[in-house]
Amino acid sequence: MSDTAHPPADAAEAPASPPVVVKKYANRRLYNTESSSYVTLDDLATMVRQGRHFVVYDAKSGEDITRSVLTQIIVEEEAKGRNLLPTSFLRQIIGFYGDSMQSLVPRYLESVMGAFSRQQDQVRRAMESTIGGFNPLMGLEEMGKQNMAMMERAMSLFAPFRGGLEEPSGEAARIAALQAEVDRLKAQLESLQKK
């Protein structure tokens, strides 16, 4: 499971602290007034994932442009190949612009995403309470050690029959190959857990 935090399920929830103010300048640079530093769209996306509330204002006009910046973040994420929005969904959304139902769509989507987020949190908590502190990577290393010991014992049973045909360095190479395989499997598990 990922340790990525998720934003509040309901956007109408009041943030625990005042929102971070970000100013967008004419040169398209974004300035975080809290940290007194320039930020990127990736930085803002990270803030969203951490549940940090922010607002973006045009530095010259003072206009709230948070919605357009959030939309830019979505476009950037989609352009990176992190396709979250199906083409059919995008077509449906575009179809609602100018439609008599346009005013209902934002509230409906907000409600559905809030419910989805709450269900996701419930499933995560249920999995954590069911599995407890089980971490498959912790067991993988121990399992690898046990497998190595078992193979070494099995190989020692055949040692009297080998007649010195195989040099000890060959056995070391096999052990190194097995360790490399265990490391590869461990890396795969870690990458799957991060998704």
Image (cartoon, helix red, strand yellow):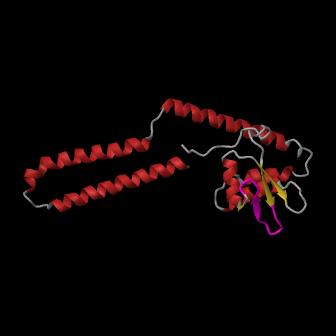
So how many labels did they put on this image? Answer: 0
- Identify which residue, 106 or 6, lies in the foreground: 6
Side of 85 relative to 66 (left or right): left
What residue occupies the far bottom of the structure in this picture?
A: 27
Q: Which image quadrant is residue 135 in?
A: top left
Q: Does the magenta stretch include residue 95?
A: no
- Magenta stretch in the rendered image: 24-35
Q: Work out which quarter of the rendered image holds the N terminus and state it.
A: top right
Side of 63 relative to 122 (left or right): right
Q: Which image quadrant is residue 127 in?
A: top right
Side of 31 relative to 50 (left or right): right
Residue 149 place in picture, x, y as percent: 24, 45
Residue 68 place in picture, x, y as percent: 81, 56
Residue positioned 82% across, 65% down in the render: 25
SS majority, magenta: loop
Residue 79 place in picture, x, y as percent: 68, 62
Residue positioned 38% across, 41% down in the render: 139
Residue 169 place in picture, x, y as percent: 18, 62
Residue positioned 66% across, 34% down in the render: 119
Residue positioned 56% across, 31% down in the render: 126
With respect to residue 169, does 67 lie above or below? Answer: above
